[in-house]
């Protein structure tokens, strides 16, 4: 394996599955239990904010009883190992949990936002949020009530950090996708961007994703198995 120094990793809910976080489209996933139009769209929030707050309050509360797994920790080791040899890991995650942070990763682009933050529609502030939100929640910045929402990107909203993601893919030696079904854009389009630039692309997933055919390499299995194995190989080559 040639020495890889600049790597871009995209993660999805599959990397957090073995920590106990439900994925979205597996048979017992989140969207098998909830209609995404009711709980993950601006229209759903406008129609029934209490339902949306309860949906995210339950997912936020669940975070406090789960831990990062070997895949999260391996990616943190990769970030440190690449930096040590003058390289860089750019970790782009679709996940809104904080398991990458708690696993030790530092340079993380949360393109779909973060459960442990809230934003105020009145003043635009983005603030830490570890407690339940409700329609009565008061903004700690402008002291106005009623405008707080989860700092999560809903369907039809614009994902965050897209320029940084594109820049990182432009200069990558390798693009790796871990634990995502490849069904939601723009994240699902990153592999095509990488390939159009001649950047090799590898998929680490439980099973082939919707865009498996676009990858130049793939390893299938549980993230806690295939991710540490791959990281060890990358760091073994100096
Ligand atoms: N190890 C590796 N991969 C796994 C594991 C595991 N233990 N368990 C499940 N997977 C894989 C599944 O095979 C599937 O391909 O993870 C993927 C999860 O896909 P989705 O449930 O569609 O989740 P994700 O791709 O993250 O969804 C993307 O959709 O609803 C939106 O905003 C939401 O960020 C989310 C986006």
Image (cartoon, grey):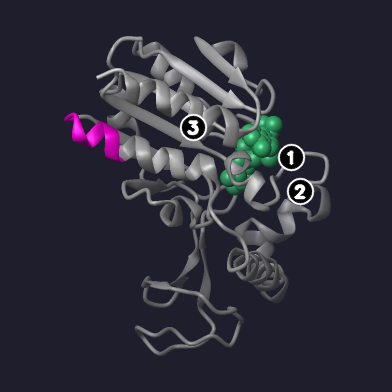
| Of 104 and 130, the residue lying toward us | 104
User: Foreground mark, 2 or 3?
Assistant: 3
Q: Which mark is residue 31?
A: 2
Question: Residue 139: image x %, image y %?
Answer: 43, 83
Q: How many labels, in total?
A: 3
Residue 26 seen in the current view: yes
With respect to residue 113, does 146 lie above or below? below
Q: Nearer the viewer, mark 3 or mark 1?
A: 3
Q: Which SS class for mark 3?
A: helix
Q: Is residue 146 magenta?
A: no
Quarter holding the C terminus is: top left
Residue sitting at x 19%, y 29%: 85
Please check the rendered image and state whether residue 83 is part of the magenta-colored stretch, yes or no.
yes
Of 234 and 50, the residue lying toward us: 234
- Gap in Å between the C-alphas at discs 1 and 2? 6 Å
Mark 1–mark 2 contact, CB under 8 Å?
Answer: yes
Residue span colored magenta: 80-86
- Up the image or down, 21 lies above or below 173; here it is below
Beta carbon of the mark 2 residue lies under 8 A of ligand 1: yes
- Distance between the Cα atoms at labels 2 and 3? 29 Å
> Can residue 180 be seen at all in this image of the molecule?
no
Residue carrying label 3? 228
Residue 230: horizontal and vertical position, in percent? 47, 24
Identity of the residue drawn at 42% across and 77% down:
122
Q: Which mark is residue 184?
A: none
Q: Earlier in the sequence, mark 1 or mark 2?
A: 1
Please state which of residues 123 and 81 is positioned toward the viewer in this rendering. 81
Residues under labels 3 and 1: Cα distance? 24 Å
- Residue drawn at x 49%, y 18% is 202
């Amino acid at each position: 394996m040639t020495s890889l120094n600049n790597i871009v990793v995209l993660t999805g809910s599959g990397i957090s599955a073995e920590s106990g976080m439900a994925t979205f489209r597996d048979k017992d996933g989140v969207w098998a239990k909830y209609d995404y139009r009711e709980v993950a769209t601006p229209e759903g929030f406008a129609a029934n904010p209490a339902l949306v707050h309860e949906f995210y309050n339950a997912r936020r509360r669940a975070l406090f009883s789960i831990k990062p797994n070997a895949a999260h920790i391996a990616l943190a080791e990769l970030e440190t190992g690449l930096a040590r040899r003058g390289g860089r890991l750019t970790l782009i995650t679709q996940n809104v949990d904080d398991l990458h942070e708690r696993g030790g990763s530092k340079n993380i682009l949360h393109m779909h936002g973060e459960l442990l933050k809230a934003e105020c529609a009145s003043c635009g502030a983005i603030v830490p949020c570890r407690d339940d939100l409700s329609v009565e929640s008061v903004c700690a910045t402008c002291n106005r009530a009623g405008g707080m929402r989860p700092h999560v990107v809903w369907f039809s909203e614009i994902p965050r950090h897209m320029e940084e993601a594109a820049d990182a893919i432009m200069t990558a030696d390798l693009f790796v996708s871990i634990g995502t079904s490849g069904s939601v854009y723009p994240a699902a389009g990153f592999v095509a961007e990488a390939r159009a630039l001649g950047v090799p692309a590898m998929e680490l997933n439980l099973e082939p994703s919707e865009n498996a055919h676009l990858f130049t390499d793939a390893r299938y299995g549980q993230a806690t198995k295939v991710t540490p194995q791959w990281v060890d190989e990358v760091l073994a080559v100096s």
